[in-house]
């Protein structure tokens, strides 16, 4: 076990007790990156090599020099006995939608490949103020549009550390790969339909989608502004609590960052689950998918070992004192994806209109004497297929003649999705749940190239996670076992607004209750 | 395949979106748009109460949870040159673009 394999809270203990230095911690992470990451994604990637197929490619850019400088400064402060921040010396990576002053912030798109952010996002700023050290920016689906990371303009795309022939999930796949491979103990991601939780499940790590408004979106390149949530990706629940503590809270620079006090997440973390009411819903154990030819929606049960892992988690929690309530109805779950197809596309199209080759980012090199031609050439040359698809769909379903049929109807379905959760979390209601326990994903990670290009099937990978984005509620994906094929399984907890402390508490209990199980000692393939 | 987005509608959308696609891109994108519309049509079968309101944010905000609005006062940016440096073409603090077409309105 190397230093970089320790969790953030273990590293903090080692640093404070002067058993290691911040510089040693950063050096260890850099050595791991050199060992497993391979070449970073770039616009001029050339031919894929055998070596590429065996490495992780989580990072787009690594800021080694700055990170080492920051580490030395922290070590000097510690040597002088000066106070340092609560996360001093802990390396982290940030999905490349988080603006960080004077660093490239590309959204994994050619259109922003030359964009150096002139300011820093609130989430990154808060981590840095606590002494955490940004080691680099990690790859993702272009503009976050995808569930596999294959759509990045910066190839080679990230690969899953458990099996590098498979996707890490997405869109925060670079984040989850970097954490699972031990390159960093934690990473910042964003979640619009499951983009933190789905790749966390695929890579066997912890991913938290906070309540909408719990963490500021200031300085984050937007996908769908009413759904986007920044959040932590870590290797265990305690680190997730540490990280969320640092980034949560109101922000005068984001009018949607809610003015709700942030509880002490660590204070309640070890309080167990005695008396907690945790639900299981049959609507989260069957998957919907569309027949490409007929357009008919079919349903079938989730992968058996995923169902078994969720029920095993329920049994563990029950043994620890939780009350398990079965047959909780969530009748509108299956409508989450079709509603997302409409709402997210309208918001994405709106957000992408700003990229025009005028104010920043890419402009076509061809000399044009007509502004409109310059717009078209710039956008065509620099947007990939997935952004183009979202722009066109967003414009279609929000057009005046179609908006009642599509957009307004989807917003009403969103109200139904919210109502499902209101009813099960209602303290005076029939179920009075503290949390709903579900699979995070219908399947384990799939092979690279197996689904990419089929934009409908790819979206259905998010069907158990997207409901929380529509409803705004928090969700957390936790490692729940290893499937028969050796790939990680994620289990998900969903809770009422601002109940992150409860979800973390239940998640920590699940960690304790399963800590001696054999699957906990398995490691990703790149670390064996 | 039943078509909702015909080539004519598609071309109109492409123009409105300020895009310019080659044939291969256009064929892929139009096919995927129509596939997505098939999925979206599932929404039409859902019975909706007449008085059901749209939800634009899952979490509702109230006076206590909504951050106070900032004062509407002008504040100088500490370094406007840094912002302008991002523009592809700048001259004397003006952003340069190709000619903006003019149309005479009758």
Image (spheres, grey):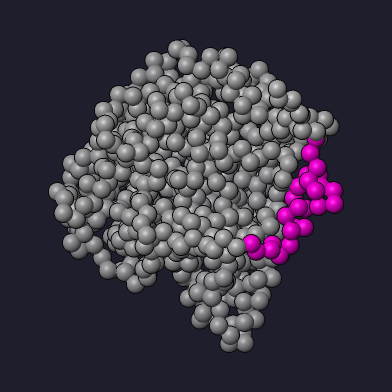
As rendered, which of A388 and B78 lies closer to the eye? B78
Magenta stretch: dominant secondary structure: loop
**Where A400 falls versus A318 (above or below)?**
above
- Residue that protrudes farthest toward the front in the picture: B106
**Where A448 falls versus A202 (above or below)?**
above
In the rendered structure, the answer to whether residue A510 lies left or right of residue A20 reads: left
As rendered, which of A237 and A196 lies closer to the eye? A196
In the rendered structure, the answer to whether residue A63 lies left or right of residue B69 reads: right
Q: Is residue A259 visible?
A: yes
Residue for point 58% across, 48% down: A221
- Residue that protrudes farthest toward the top in the picture: B1
x and y, in percent, of residue A236 in the image: 42, 60
Residue for point 56% across, 28% down: A392
Residue for point 66% across, 23% down: B21
The region drawn magenta spans B74-98
x and y, in percent, of residue A79 in the image: 61, 85
As rendered, which of A261 and A320 lies closer to the eye? A261
- Residue that protrudes farthest toward the bottom in the picture: A81
């Amino acid at each position: 076990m190397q230093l970089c394999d320790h969790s953030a809270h273990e590293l903090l203990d080692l640093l404070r007790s002067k058993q290691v230095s911040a510089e040693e911690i950063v050096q260890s992470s850099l050595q791991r990156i050199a060992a497993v990451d391979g070449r970073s994604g770039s616009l001029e990637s050339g031919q894929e090599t055998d070596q590429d197929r065996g490495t992780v490619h989580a990072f787009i850019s690594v800021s080694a020099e700055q990170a080492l400088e920051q580490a030395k400064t922290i070590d000097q402060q510690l040597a002088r006995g000066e106070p340092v921040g609560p996360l001093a010396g802990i390396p982290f990576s940030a999905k490349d939608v988080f603006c960080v002053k004077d660093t490239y912030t590309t959204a994994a798109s050619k259109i922003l490949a030359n964009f150096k952010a002139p300011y820093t996002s609130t989430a990154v700023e808060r981590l840095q103020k606590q002494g955490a050290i940004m080691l680099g920016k990690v790859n993702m689906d272009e503009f976050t549009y995808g569930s596999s990371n294959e759509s990045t303009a910066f190839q080679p795309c990230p690969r899953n550390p458990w099996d590098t022939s498979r996707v890490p999930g997405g869109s925060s796949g670079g984040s989850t790969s970097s954490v699972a491979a031990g390159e960093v103990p934690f990473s910042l991601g964003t979640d619009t339909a499951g983009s933190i939780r789905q790749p966390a499940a695929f890579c066997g790590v912890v991913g938290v989608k906070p309540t909408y408004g719990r963490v500021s979106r200031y300085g984050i390149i937007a996908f769908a502004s009413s759904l986007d949530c920044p959040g932590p990706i870590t290797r265990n629940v305690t680190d997730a609590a540490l990280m969320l503590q640092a980034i949560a809270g109101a922000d005068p620079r984001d009018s949607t960052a809610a003015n709700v006090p942030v509880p002490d997440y660590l204070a309640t973390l070890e309080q167990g689950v005695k008396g907690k009411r945790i639900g299981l819903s049959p609507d989260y154990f069957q998957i919907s998918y569309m027949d490409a030819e007929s357009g008919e929606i079919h349903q079938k049960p989730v992968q058996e070992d995923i169902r078994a892992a969720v029920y095993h988690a329920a049994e563990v929690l029950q043994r620890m004192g939780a009350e398990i309530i079965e047959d909780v109805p969530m009748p509108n779950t299956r409508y989450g994806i079709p509603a997302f197809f409409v709402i997210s596309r309208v918001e994405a199209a709106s957000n992408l209109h700003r990229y025009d080759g005028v104010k920043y980012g890419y402009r076509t090199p061809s000399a044009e004497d007509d502004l409109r031609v310059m717009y078209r050439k710039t956008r065509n040359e620099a947007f990939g297929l997935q952004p183009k698809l979202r722009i066109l769909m967003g414009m279609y379903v929000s057009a005046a003649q179609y908006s009642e049929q599509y957009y307004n109807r989807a917003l009403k379905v969103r109200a139904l999705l919210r109502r499902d959760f209101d009813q099960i979390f209602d303290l005076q209601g029939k179920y009075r749940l503290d949390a709903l326990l579900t699979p995070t994903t219908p399947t384990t990670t799939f092979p690279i190239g197996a689904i990419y290009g089929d934009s409908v099937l790819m979206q259905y990978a998010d069907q158990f996670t997207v409901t929380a984005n529509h409803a705004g509620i928090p969700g957390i994906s936790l490692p729940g076992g290893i499937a028969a094929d050796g790939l990680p399984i994620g289990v998900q907890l969903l809770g009422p607004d601002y109940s992150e402390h409860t979800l973390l508490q239940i998640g920590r209990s699940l960690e304790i209750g399963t800590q001696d199980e054999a699957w906990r000692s398995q490691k990703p393939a790149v670390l064996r | 395949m039943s078509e909702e987005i015909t080539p004519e509608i598609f071309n109109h959308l492409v123009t409105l979106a300020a895009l310019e696609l080659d044939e291969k891109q256009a064929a892929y994108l139009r096919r995927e748009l129509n596939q997505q519309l098939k999925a979206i049509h599932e929404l039409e079968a859902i019975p909706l109460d007449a008085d059901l309101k749209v939800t634009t944010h899952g979490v509702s905000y109230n006076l206590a949870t909504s951050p106070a609005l900032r004062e509407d006062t002008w504040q100088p940016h500490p370094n406007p040159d840094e912002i302008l440096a991002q523009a592809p073409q700048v001259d004397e603090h003006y952003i340069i673009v190709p000619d903006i077409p003019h149309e005479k309105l009758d």
